[in-house]
Image (tube, rainbow, N blue to C red):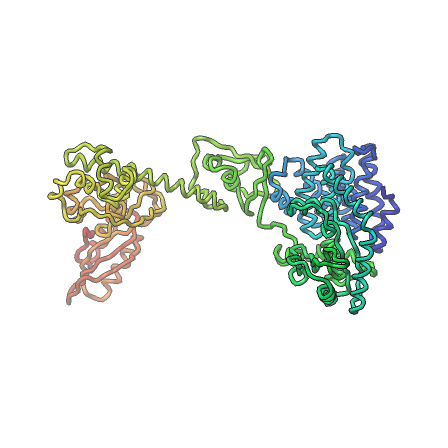
Amino acid sequence: MMRQFELVEQVKSYDPTADEDALNRAYVYTMKQHGAQRRASGDPYFSHPIEVAGILTRYKLDTASIISALLHDTIEDTDATQAEIEKMFGPDVARLVDGVTKLSRIELQSDRSKQAENFRKLVLAMSEDIRVLLIKLADRLHNMRTLKYIASDEKRRRIALETMEIYAPLAERIGMSEIKNELEDLAFAELHPEVRDSIVARLNFLREQGTHLIERIIGELERRLKESGVEAEVTGREKMPYSIWRKMQTKNVAFEQLSDIMAFRVIVKDVNDCYHALGVIHSRYPMVPGRFKDYISTPKPNGYRSLHTGVLGPESHRIEIQIRSQEMHDVAELGVAAHWTYKTGHHPADGTQYRWLRELLDAMEHAASPEEFLEHTKLEMFQDQVFCFTPKGDLIALPRGACPVDFAYAVHSKVGDTCVGAKINGRIMPLRTPLNNGDQVEIVTSKAQSPNPTWERFVVTAKARARIRRFVRTQQRNQYLDLGRAMLGRAFKQEGYEMTEKAIEGVLKIFKEDSVEDLTVLVGQGTIPARDVVVAIYPELKTTAKPDNVVSLRRRTQKSRGPAMPIRGLIPGMAMHFAACCHPLPGDRIVGIVTTGKGVTIHTIDCEMLEQYAETPERWLDIAWNEDPKQDEAHVGRINLVVQNEPGSLGSLSTVIAKNLGNITNLKITNRSADFFEMLLDIEVRDVKHLTNIIAALRATPAINSVERARK
Ligand code: MN
């Protein structure tokens, strides 16, 4: 365990301005808080946070991170509170400790290995400050180093699996290959001890046999490079047992080849020397095909840069070589930390290298957008997603802005269709509440519920939207189906027949439909006249058919009118429009005519146009205005006028209409003589009473000879 003064010395060595007093206070505070608590190893508990802080000094983290590492378990495991920590160490530390605490709580939620990638994303998304992730990784590293002390096989295994699937890939993602390798190897030892033991034994054997060989290869490579004027440091490195095993698995080979266990590394001054060294090696030794990779011109997403190649090297041994500059090497081992040091041009000697972190935070605060910040750090933080839990602990990934309805549909279509409410973190919340990372969402369902079309306004997932729309369409289809049945029934009756499904089935082919239901829906929509179906069954009726009732198979897609229906007797969702001939107004007696391809057209009962439908009563629908139509809804009424052709008569006409709160929307002079205008006027009014009042007022106007409501 690192002693107090050692930790402080360590931090001071790279940051002379570090707040020594705060570090000392944090060290003492965590010892006091954890008190007599013990680790599974028997060590005092406080040795753990101190070790975690020690790990982070290797990455030259700022004082706030080191202090937060010291305190990282105090909120969860002692009576310390965030408020107290904030008072003692400031808001920055309090926020970091809170972040690590929240991450630890997610860990407890469930078996996350099933959805490893989602959990990795969740951890990243929760680590809004990258320091939270760094502290978490150091925490996990120390827990893995002491994993063997945990008594429960099952618990050790679970932690190792989680490390392998969540934390090692996260360390890799931010380029910290040292931590990644150690995490993997520790997890490997727990998960497959026999495999690892046999690989280690084999490595020891080969090492004994090959020491001199490796030395010879290093010597020869160095000599060749020097002869060609490249200054380079060559090292031979044994691969980690886990990476050997993974390679054996993926390539399905045994590791007899030296190239499978050893990696040679050539460290040179700069990028030019990398390619120079590569040229020297390739010109001297035969290349192994398919092994060359240029990660300098195309770095890996985590910033890794290097040249990789495989050659038949000294003494014809197949070897793998990585060629990189010192800078590339530091970035590969230390990840974002080193990356930032180099990017900002501070060099290890000047005591400011921890500044990468300061500047990273600065960039985070001042970046114009999260995207810009991510661009800086090459970190994917998944700003566009939220991750929530089911009560059972399953993780559901959703786009940002998603609400409980999206969540419900993501769980299961049925859950979405029947959801009536949601509990977010145990509290009942509106269905349109935007979800946050880590929320636990419990959906309340009811069999009586069906998708509400208004949900479409706030859901964000395609699945939810599609299901809601599909439901609305199905509902509409059912309405057309009911209407079609009624119309067919009337059409049959009209001709003195009883409607039977069997009879309709017999003529499906004529209409090119597959089912009675499909055909009935088309009749309901008005695409196929009901009488056509009856005539198809009883061809002898054809002679009495009107010319405009000729079978029409042409279909038009029909959009339904959106707003609530002001008319009773219509089926909601059914296409409906007002006839242009008679301009029905609320208060008029009306009738609906089912029109081919257009749904229902509303006429006034005295409209002259109705005569043409006299022979097809099955197309007539009994409808009426709702008693209490919306007062603010405007309808267009049409009137014919005869006005004296004299100055000011049109002016007084419009004045009278305006005074009576009508609004002229269309005016057309249909006839004009020396003395009179005949004209047609469209006026927006509330209802028929409103129009009647206007007509009465016009009739009382001297310049106006006659006023009639238009009937055709
Ligand atoms: Mn811990």
Q: Residue at x 29, y 38 (%)?
A: 515
Measured along the vertical axis of the image, is residue 50 above or below residue 319? above
Furthest residue toward bottom: 229
Residue 279, given in percent of the width and then of the height, sits at 71, 66
Instruction: Say whether residue 588 is visible.
Output: no
Instruction: Say whether residue 459 is visible.
Output: yes
Quadrant into which the N terminus falls: top right
Q: Nearer the viewer, residue 689 or 460?
A: 460
Residue 335 left/right relative to 25: left
Residue 709, given in percent of the width and then of the height, sits at 20, 51
Residue 646 left/right relative to 567: left
Q: Which image quarter: residue 277? A: bottom right
Q: Nearer the viewer, residue 587 or 68?
A: 68
Q: Which image quarter: residue 126? A: top right
Q: Residue at x 17, y 63 (%)?
A: 671
Residue 367, given in percent of the width and then of the height, sits at 65, 58
